[in-house]
Amino acid sequence: MCLAIPALVVELLPADMARIDLDGMRKEVSLSLVDDVAVGDYVIVHVGYALQKLDPEEAAQTLALFAELARQP
């Protein structure tokens, strides 16, 4: 099973890379598959690659759902 997670772009780096924030955890990912990404954008991330940009409202809904699932016993 694959899981792609919405993440906030917090810094653009050289060589088509970016630093993202995943609920407080920072990680570097490749932006080579996505055009026109800016700081403050949300992207869908899977195995170190941003796959597409995501609407901020949709990202918030998805992250809220993940948080709710994490609270389930």
Image (cartoon, rainbow, N blue to C red):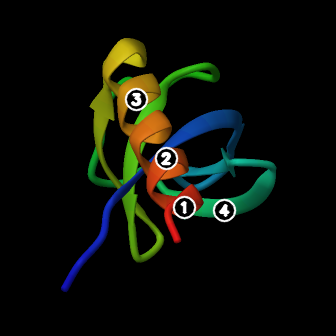
What x and y, as percent, mark residue 4? 32, 61
Return the disc, 4 or 2, that comes first in the chain's sequence.
Answer: 4
Q: Residues within 10 Å of mark 2 (few under 14, many from 20)?
A: few
- Which amino acid, mark 3? Ala
Closest to the camera, between mark 3 and mark 1, is 1
- The residue shown at (47%, 30%) is 42
According to the picture, the residue beneath numbered tag 2 turns out to be 68
- Label 1: how many residues lie within 10 Å, few (<14), some (14-19) or many (20+)? few
Foreground disc of the pair 4, 2: 2
Amino acid identity at mark 4 = Glu
Contact, CB < 8 Å: mark 2 with mark 3? no
Q: Earlier in the sequence, mark 4 or mark 1?
A: 4
The amino acid type, in three-letter code, at marker 1 is: Ala
Query: Which of the 4 quarters of the picture holds residue 58?
Result: top left
- Residue 28 — which label? 4
Task: Classify residue 62 as left or right of residue 33.
Answer: right
Mark 3 to mark 1: distance in Å? 17 Å
The residue indicated by pointer 1 is 70
According to the picture, the residue beneath numbered tag 3 turns out to be: 59
Residue at image position (63%, 23%) is 39
Q: SS for tag 1?
A: helix
| Residue at the left extreme, as displayed | 1
Amino acid residing under circle 2: Glu
Question: Cβ–Cβ below 8 Å for labels 2 and 1?
Answer: yes
Q: Residue placed at 37% from the left, 23% from the top?
A: 36
Q: Residue furthest front?
A: 73
Judge the density around disc 3: few (<14), some (14-19), many (≥20) Cα neighbours within 10 Å: many
User: Disc 4 on helix, strand or loop?
Assistant: strand
Q: CA distance from mark 4 to mark 1?
A: 24 Å
Asked if the residue at tag 2 contacts the one at tag 4, i.e. Cβ–Cβ closer than 8 Å, the answer is no
